[in-house]
Image: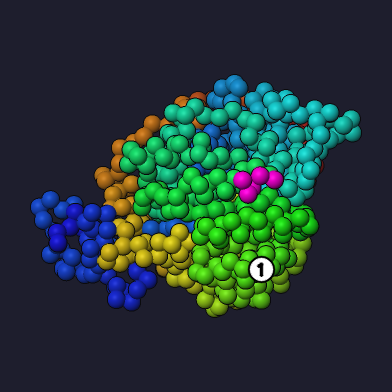
Amino acid sequence: MQADTILYNGKIYSHVRENKGATAVAIKDGKFIAVGTDSDIMTLSTAATKIIDLKQKRVVPGINDSHIHLIRGGLNYNLELRWDGVPSLADALRMLKQQVDITPSPQWVRVVGGWSEFQFAERRMPTLDEINAIAPETPVFILHLYDRAFMNRAALKAVGYTKDTPAPPGGQIQRDSKGEPTGLIIASPNAMILYSTLAKGPKLSYEHQVNSTRHYMKELNRFGITSVIDAGGGFQNFPDDYQVVNELNEKKQLTVRIAYNLFTQRPKKEFEDFNDWIDSVKLYQGDDMYRHNGAGEMLVFSAADFEDFLQPRPDLPENMEAELEKVVRLLVENRWPFRLHATYNESITRFLNVFEKIDREVPFNGLPWIFDHAETIDERNIERVKKLGGGIAIQSRMAYQGEYFTDRYGAAAAESTPPIKKMLEMEVPVGGGSDATRVSSYNPWVSMYWLTAGKTVGGLQLYTDTRLSRETALELYTRGSAWFSQEQQKKGDIQTGMFADLAVLDKDYFTVSEEAVKSIEAELTIVDGKIVYAKGDFSSYSPPVIPILPDWSPTKSFNGYYSDATHGHKLLEAEKKNAGKPNLTAQVHSCAGSCNVHNHNHDTARMSNLPINNYNAFWGALGCSCFAF
C-alpha cells in the first residue's frame, strides 16, 4: 500500500508498546497505514507522496476534549474578546480599551469566561469604575466563571435593567443605596441570570457565524485539538443553532471532529424534549467528522448543581428525583447514551439512587453513560459508577477556581478534587476536557499543566500526591476521551488503522519544564490525514488564510488565547496609531517596580486587593495613580 503522506525524522508518541521509539508515520485515505522507523516507512512512498521532515519534533495523538461547548462557542467566537492567559489586569484593560474604540454601535464588547483573577499579576478583578471609565458609551459585558458578570452603564441600558427589574430566582442584581443596579450581577448560585443576560446581546449574522466557527476551530487546531465532544449548553437550541456546523460538514470544512450531545431546552418540558428527539434523531447519526452522541449534559433543570465555589453547595429540590427518573428511564428504554452535569458528591449520591432504581427495572446492561465534572465524588460513589458501567469526564475547572474551593473547604479537601487517581485505580473510564468557553479556557496544555504540576493558573499548589504523570495526563486527553463517544477503536492513538489525527508540538511535552507545559502549541495539526494548521518550520504547508468577519472582530486584533508575540505586536500598532492621544490604559501599565519619582513600591499596590481606580488623581491609596491598574 502506497502512502498519501509520510512524516519522518520525528519523535512519535504512541500509547502502545509496539510503537515506542517510532520516528515516522504513513497516512492514506485519512488513516495511519504504518508506524515505525524512517527506513521502513519510506518504502511506502511514491513520486506523488507528500513527504514532511518533522525535524526531530515531538508528535502526539490528536487532542480530544471530551467536554467543551464548541458549537455555541463557535457562533460567538468572533464576538468575544478573550482574556485567556493574559498575564496582567493592566494588559486586559488595555485590550478592552482598544476593542471598545473599534466596536460599532449597537454591538457589545464581551469577555466571556476562560480567565481567573488569580492569573493576573494584580490578582484581582476589574472594578466597575474602571470598566465605565474605559467604555462610557459602548456596552461591555465581562463574565467571570459562573459566579458573576460585570456590566457597564451602557450595557445596563442596553438590556433594560433598572431599579424596577426583579432578579430571577437564584440570581442577584447588585444595587446601590438608591436601589439602582450597579452593573454587577451574581449567580447565587444559579447561573441562569448570567446566561439570560448575555443572550440579550446582538448576534452575528449567519454568514459571520460560519466564519466565526471556522476561526474557533482553527484556534483549537492551534493547540493540537483534533476532536471534541460538544456538551450542548444553555441557550443553544437544536436544530437551529446546529445549522452552521451542519453546513460546514457538508462542505468538508470542519477541521475538528465533533460528537454532539443534546441538552434539554425547556424547564419542566425536559421529557418532551428528549421524547421528540428520540423520534426525530437517530442515535449516532452523521459521519466520522460530525455525529450525534446522545443526551445531556443537562437532562433536567432541577438536577443542575452549578460549581460556584464562592457560594455554599446548592441543595437540589425535592422533586429532582422524580423528574430525573422520568427522563433517564426514557433514555435507557431507548438505549440512548446520556451524560449529566454533577459537581458535588451529595448530588451524585442522589443521582445514583435514581440510576440504580431504574437499572433494577430497565437494566443499563452496557449502555454508556457519563458523569461530568465530579469534583467531590467519593470512593463509594466511584464504585457505584463502575458497577453501572459509567464513565467520568473531568475538566480543568479547578485550575481556575482552586483558590475559591480551598478557601471554602480547605487544602486537604482540594487535594483530591476531582479524585482522578482513584478513578483510574478503580478502572472507571476517565476522559479529559475543559468545559470551555465560559468557565475554563479551551487550551488543553493548561489542563495538562494543572494535572501534572498540580497547580492553578494562579500558581496555587492544589495537588501533591494526586498529581498525574505526563503520560497519564496525555492519555486522558486522547485515548481516554475516545471512550466518551464510543470511538476508542477509531481514534486516540497513533496506530495502524486509526484515524490520522495528530499534532506536532513546538516543545517536547515530555521533557520541557513544568511551567513550559502550559505554553505548548502545535506547529502542525493533521485531521483525517489533512493539514488543518501549520506554522513555524511547517508554515509552507499552512491552509489558505480565511478572512476574519466582521472587520472589527476581537479575533482580528487578538486571536484568542494570549500570545506574547501576537498581543505585543497588536498593542504596539494601537499605540502608534494613537500616538499623542490620551490613553488611559497605557497610563495604567506605564511603570514597573518602584517609582523613581515618589519612591514607593508599585508592586505593593499591584498585589493588593484595594480598589484603586482614580486615574486622574496624583496619589492613589498606595501611591501615585500611574500604576493604579
**Whether residue 592 can be seen here:** no
> Outermost residue toward the front?
361
> Outermost residue toward the left?
47
Query: What residue is at 28 percent from the left and 49 percent from the top?
Result: 530
Residue 172 image offset from top left, x and y in percent:
79, 41
Q: Magenta stretch: residue 297 in it?
A: no
Residue type highlighted by circle 1: Lys
Residue 20 image offset from top left, x and y in percent:
31, 74
Pointer 1: residues within 10 angstroms few (<14), some, or many (20+)? few
Q: Nearer the viewer, residue 385 or 327?
A: 327
Residue 343 image offset from top left, x and y in percent:
67, 60
Query: What residue is at 16 percent from the left and 68 percent from the top?
Result: 39
Q: Start and end of the magenta stretch?
A: 268-272
Q: Quadrant of the C terminus?
A: top right
Q: Nearer the viewer, residue 273 or 605?
A: 273
Query: What residue is at 89 percent from the left and 33 percent from the top?
Result: 177
Residue 455 image offset from top left, x and y in percent:
60, 64
Q: Nearer the viewer, residue 119 or 332?
A: 332
* Direction from residue 560 to residue 422 in the image, left or right: right
Task: Tell me which colouring the rendered structure shows.
Answer: rainbow
Query: What residue is at 31 percent from the left and 52 percent from the top?
Result: 528
- Indicate whether 384 appears above or below 53: below
Q: Which residue is mark 1?
A: 357
Q: Main secondary structure of the magenta part?
A: helix
- Indicate whether 184 appears above or below 23: above
